[in-house]
Image (tube, rainbow, N blue to C red):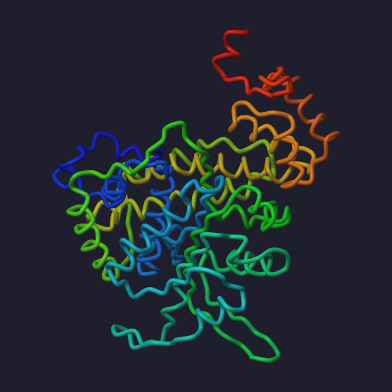
Amino acid sequence: MSLWKGYVGIEQDNALAQTTNFVTLYLHACGISEVPQNYHMWSCLSFLSAALENRIWFEKHKKKKLLPNIYVFLVGPGSLGKGHAIGSVYNDLHREAKLPNKVHPGKITSKGLIDVMTSRVETNYQTGEPYMPYANIWVITDELKSDIGTGHLAADFISTMTQMYTGYFDTSDTTRTHGSKPIQKPCPVWTAGTTEEWLMQVFTQDDIYSGAAARIVFSFEDYGPTRYWRAEAPKDEKQVMDYLVARSKMLPYIEGQIYMTDKAEDFERSWYLGRRSPNDRAMWPAWKRGHDLALKLAMLFAVADGGPLVINYNHIFRATELVKQSQDGIARLFTLAGRSPETISINYVENLIRKKKRVTHTRLLNHVSSTRGIKAEGLRRYINEAVQKGLVRRTTGKYGGVEYVWIEREEKKEDS
């Protein structure tokens, strides 16, 4: 299900006559495929965030600029389209529009990131002051584990990105060998793709519970029931994409403070004061960051509409709806972080049977022993638990061997 409600109702061959909203039009041009639409939505918002850099801001606190940069992780099983969604917005919009902002796709370390961000100094044509254009960098790691590694390499990179998320003040990286490298007004955008298994190998429990994860939107998706042997593109795809590329070329010229209408401010106040605090204290960092995220998304929605730099009621309302979804993503991340190796193995076996619908004991054992090192005794234990939970039924196969059958929801309802 798409979280972008503005997409509903767009006719397949007349989108430009119905809306000028950037995200709605992009989702329309992407068509219908097995790639989750939420992946396309968050990739598009990441693109807008990266293209705008730190040129627009909202003054949440006096003389403190809240920037529109966001960190987004697309999480799901292999071959679901994470890289496709990120690559499409990068190639079809960023590269086609030849935008000047720095993008770094692929492998990177924290030291490499600092080197890239401090590699060039330019002069602001309006103020005459020096600035670092590469401090506004779009980091793309569509294969998270491969791109930033694990262990101390990943920990260093995550802590560096965590520090630079707010962009409130200048920072620096100082070593004995290379001295001090100042970073002026960093405004990084981070878009990543990963599976649940690789995510938990990259992020330690310290990273998750210390607040690093609170700065990230985790979009969890899974395989859908419908197959598309080709993506179903709308008839006006080319016209819409040409329009979006032209709009993209104007993004580097948008700058200034974003304001908010009275109606939007009233809603924001009532929403913030009326939010229920989570019972789990570990959720508090993400819950507190939700206010900033709502304002960041509202800024992006205002730009997406193509009008003045003003957040209206619809922008902040839609932003708070997405914040609710991001909180669900954090809750799921905490569930993953709290799983024991035994629980992970049980879920792995259950998911295999669910995907295959019916599988023989021999074939299942060969698979799990070669991929996860699960032995026969462990598999029997996991199957027994799945049977007790009412997820799996043992039966005799066509040739006399034991088979495991996934119990569909409809069948469970009939049994009950």
Give whichever of 196, 122 is nearer the camera.
196
Q: Is residue 281 visible?
A: yes
Q: Is residue 309 left or right of residue 285?
A: left
Is 237 placed above or below 395 here?
A: below
Residue 59 spot, x, y in % from top left: 41, 61
Q: Can you say which quadrant of the picture contains the C terminus?
A: top right
Q: How many marks?
A: 0
Is 406 placed above or below 279 here?
A: above
Q: Is residue 166 left or right of residue 22?
A: right
Residue lying furthest right: 377
In which quarter of the view is residue 4 placed?
A: top left
In which quarter of the view is residue 313 placed?
A: top left
Give whichever of 195, 43 is nearer the camera.
195
Residue found 62% across the figure and 81% down from its top: 173
Residue 55 spot, x, y in % from top left: 36, 69
Give whichever of 228, 254 is nearer the camera.
228
Is 343 placed above or below 199 here?
A: above
Q: Is residue 388 left or right of residue 244?
A: right
In which quarter of the view is residue 172 placed?
A: bottom right
Is 156 placed above or below 235 here?
A: below
Residue 85 spot, x, y in % from top left: 41, 53
Residue found 16% across the figure and 47% down from its top: 16
Give whichever of 179, 341 is nearer the camera.
341
Residue found 57% across the figure and 53% down from its top: 194
Q: Can you say which quadrant of the picture contains the N terminus?
A: top left
Residue found 47% across the figure and 72% down from its top: 104
Residue 213 spot, x, y in % from top left: 61, 54
